[in-house]
Amino acid sequence: MLGKIVLMAACAAVLALAKPPERAVRVVTTDQVDFNGGAIHVNNAYGELNVEGWDEPRVEITVTRSTFRPPGQKEQEEGTAYLNRIKVTMQKAANGDVEISTQFPGRNRLLRVIHGLGDFTLDYRIKVPRNAKLSIRHGVGDVIILNVGGDIDAAIRSGDIVVQLPDQGNYTVDAKCKLGSVYKDVDGSQAGSGHTLHLRSLVGGISIQRSGVGL
């Protein structure tokens, strides 16, 4: 009898402590700007970064911010407010360059290094003219670049860099990993030949290949 009472009490305690499953909260923003040449700079990015070349004379960025919160209305609204504090801006300079930068909710810099930026994920989808020049400085997460035929300068702290180049075009390739490997099926080691790929990964791999699509 005593054993049944103890078991029932334990079950009641577990049920009391049980929480309803959390629900996803998402904030999606889209911005665009005309682009007439120059370079596109992506700074302080974090999460999954996808850059794709297209035929339009502008840069378009869609950012999906995600987190999880309890299903209550108050908690969901607090989650949305939290995500809205993550600012992704796109500005066009006088020389035609476009700069995309990310600002995060304030946290101690040391805590960021130890614990990460926060309990959220970011997904960037950026469309750029196919011949644009790219300069990317990325934190944690993968960088995927598809069908961009201009010069590419990308550095990532942790994650993989995947570059799928158009079938046409010659490239000077300079790709190095601190902890990881480099795969390429693109010839291009002679300085001054065509466009330049300068790729660096501190922790993660680098893959360079042809996409099967022409410019």
Image (cartoon, rainbow, N blue to C red):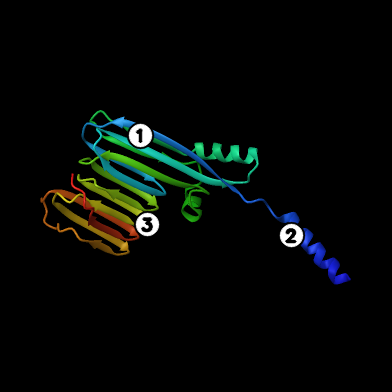
Q: Amino acid at mark 3?
A: Gly
Q: Secondary structure at mark 2?
A: helix
In percent of width and height, residue 83 lies at: 51, 40
For label 1, the crowd category at 10 Å Cα-Cα, with few meaning under 14, some 14 to 19 and many 20 or more, is some
**Nearest the eye: 141 or 108:** 141
What residue is disc 3 on?
159
Residue in the image at 61% along x and 49% along y: 22
Furthest residue to the right? 1
**Up-down: is 210 above or below 179?**
above
> Quarter of the image holding residue 150?
top left
Q: Amino acid at mark 2?
A: Val
What residue is disc 2 on?
14
For label 2, the crowd category at 10 Å Cα-Cα, with few meaning under 14, some 14 to 19 and many 20 or more, is few
In percent of width and height, residue 112 lies at: 48, 50
> Quarter of the image holding residue 6?
bottom right
> Do tag 2 and tag 1 residues touch (Cβ < 8 Å)?
no
Of the image marks 3 and 1, the number of the one nearer the N terminus: 1
Horizontal side, residue 163 vs residue 140: left or right:
left
Q: Nearer the viewer, mark 2 or mark 3?
A: 2
What residue is disc 1 on?
90
Q: Amino acid at mark 1?
A: Met
Q: Nearer the viewer, mark 2 or mark 1?
A: 2
Residue in the image at 11% along x and 53% along y: 191
Q: Secondary structure at mark 1?
A: strand
